[in-house]
Amino acid sequence: MNDQDISIIKYSGEKVKFSVNKLYTSLKRTGAEDAIVNQIIEKVIDELYQGITTKEIYNRAFSLLKKKKSFLASKYKLKKAIYELGPTGFPFERFVAAILKYSGYNVEVGKTLNGKCVKHEIDVFANKNNETTIIECKFHSEQGFNCNVKVPLYINSRYLDVKFHWEEKNKTKSKLTKGWLVTNTRFTEDALQYGNCCGLYLLSWDYPKNDGLKDRIDRLGLYPITVSTLLTNREKQFILNRNVVLCRDLIDDAFYLDHLGVSNSRKEKILNEIKQLCNTKNY
């Protein structure tokens, strides 16, 4: 049977045709050489069957890539790693704040601002070039859930309440620019339509095109510690609870690995994986 005739099942339950191009693109995003990518694709195709899930395909490709180079496998699991920042949304808020920080913003997480009607706790408060941005984050800990129109409707109403008070009471301070809504999943069509119409800046896993979360993370080398293939889930949670959310920050805070009782040899492997992943020599 031709691999193009294979139907696969997505996380949402939707059936689609298997696409070699999509698998190739996702593997190439890691920076893997063509020879490695083609070997993995060949092995995955050999094990395809009707009704195979995208999760099974991902697990097989991830396992094969990890055997080649673990730091490439870390890049490959980026989307899954973002979900692993849960189950609460707070680590994701810190992660979004970190992306903005390394993009030149001064940031605060969980800042309370007055509105015309009520006070609002803002997920991420960011300032750059005397302009202020307030960012609200919508985190999903499971795949298959998209951000629907109710979310930008709610976020825009909060933004307008803050904006009214800001312009009345903060005339000599920085300008309040458009509000942001950031999600680790995708926006539905009506959410995009409403958000763009009312002037919210929308940022999701793959939106805006070529400048979504995955693009910014790859471009800046700002991978969450949950991408590591060498840290256990318990170790990742311990580190996240110490407000260390980025791999590159763990390089400076490696003493947390000592607190966890990680052996020197394993510690060296973990830090080597992280340095390769972040490509720290370029910073």
Image (cartoon, rainbow, N blue to C red):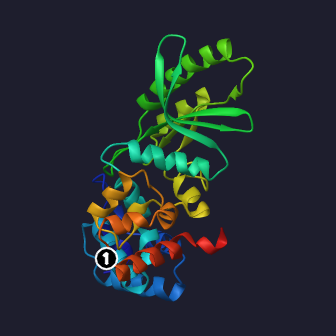
User: Is residue 173 visible in the rendered structure shown here?
Assistant: yes
Horizontal and vertical percent for residue 283?
Answer: 65, 67
* Vertical order, 13 against 30 (above or below): above
* Vertical order, 116 against 184 (above or below): above
Horizontal and vertical percent for residue 5?
Answer: 34, 72
Residue at 70%, 33% in the rendered image: 131
Q: Residues within 10 Å of mark 1 (few under 14, many from 20)?
A: some
* Front-most of residues 1 and 96: 96
Residue at 38%, 63% in the rendered image: 256
* Front-most of residues 185 and 103: 103
Residue at 50%, 20% in the rendered image: 157
Quarter of the picture containing the N terminus is: bottom left
To which residue does mark 1 refer? Answer: 60
Residue at 30%, 47% in the rendered image: 87
The secondary structure type at the circle numbered 1 is: helix
Horizontal and vertical percent for residue 186?
Answer: 45, 46
Q: Quadrant of residue 245?
A: bottom left
Horizontal and vertical percent for residue 224?
Answer: 45, 59
* Vertical order, 36 against 158 (above or below): below
Q: Amino acid at mark 1?
A: Arg
Total marks placed: 1
* Front-most of residues 2 and 29: 29
- Name the side, left or right, on which 281 lies relative to 161: right
User: Is residue 204 visible in the rendered structure shown here?
Assistant: no
- Name the side, left or right, on which 50 lies relative to 213: left
* Vertical order, 220 against 150 (above or below): below
- Name the side, left or right, on which 247 lies relative to 18: right
